[in-house]
Image (spheres, rainbow, N blue to C red):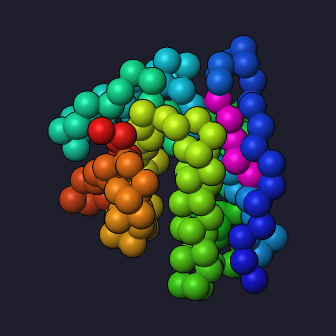
Amino acid sequence: MGIIFGNREFIDDTTLPGAQVQHFSLAGTHYGALFIPRPAWDDNTALKVTQELGVLIPEDAYEIKFDTLDSLLDDNPAHGYRTRYQLGLAPYSLMELNLLGSGLLESISLFDQDMNGSGYYGCAVDDNTQLCHYYRRLYRRYGAYFLANGLTPYTSQRGTCYAFIRE
């Protein structure tokens, strides 16, 4: 069992100009890491990240949204983030959660290799406690990797928000 990477594609140049999603799957569940150029999206997340982390988000940075592909590309925003349980899926084991985190890391890394972005940032949806804990764990596990690749990692104490800024 492992991560299987698919293609990366542009989403909709009218609604989200320049936004791209990196496809990958784990144990039959399809995921996406969506990279949205800051100018193409509202500034709410960037402002929240700046406020919580005390770091300025560059104007040409990318917001990252990560979820199952179905949830990520759902046209109905009221559906929002849904747990595996809510999607009718069994919970992941710790090993699978670690693999999922490495898939997100690799998605960011692949995107950065091509785009060499000035920064990447995001927040856990609705400050979801489980997501905050998960993102905090990923930060501790992979922060040094980003630093070694020229991106300074930042996160809040609770793991609510995160940023990787090229300085």
Q: Position of residue 147 (x, y in %)?
A: 35, 56
Does 22 lie within the magenta span? Answer: yes
Quarter of the image with the N terminus is: bottom right
Q: Relative to 62, is 101 above or below? A: below
Q: Residue at x 76, y 60 (%)?
A: 5
Q: Position of residue 84 (x, y in %)?
A: 64, 67
Q: Residue at x 25, y 53 (%)?
A: 156
Does 76 lie within the magenta span? Answer: no
Q: Relative to 76, is 80 above or below? A: below
Q: Position of residue 57 (x, y in %)?
A: 32, 31
Q: Residue at x 68, y 35 (%)?
A: 20
Is residue 9 or residue 92 the one in the foreground?
Answer: 9
On the question of residue 7 being in view, the answer is yes
Characterize the magenta stretch by its predominant secondary structure: strand
Q: Residue at x 30, y 38 (%)?
A: 167
Name the side, left or right, on which 28 lies relative to 71. Answer: right
Residue that sits furthest to the left in the current view:
54
Stretch in magenta: 19-23
Number of numbered discs: 0
Q: Relative to 17, is 115 above or below? A: below
Q: Position of residue 113 (x, y in %)?
A: 59, 45
On the question of residue 160 being in view, the answer is no
Name the side, left or right, on which 42 lies relative to 17. Answer: left
Name the side, left or right, on which 39 lies relative to 104. Answer: left
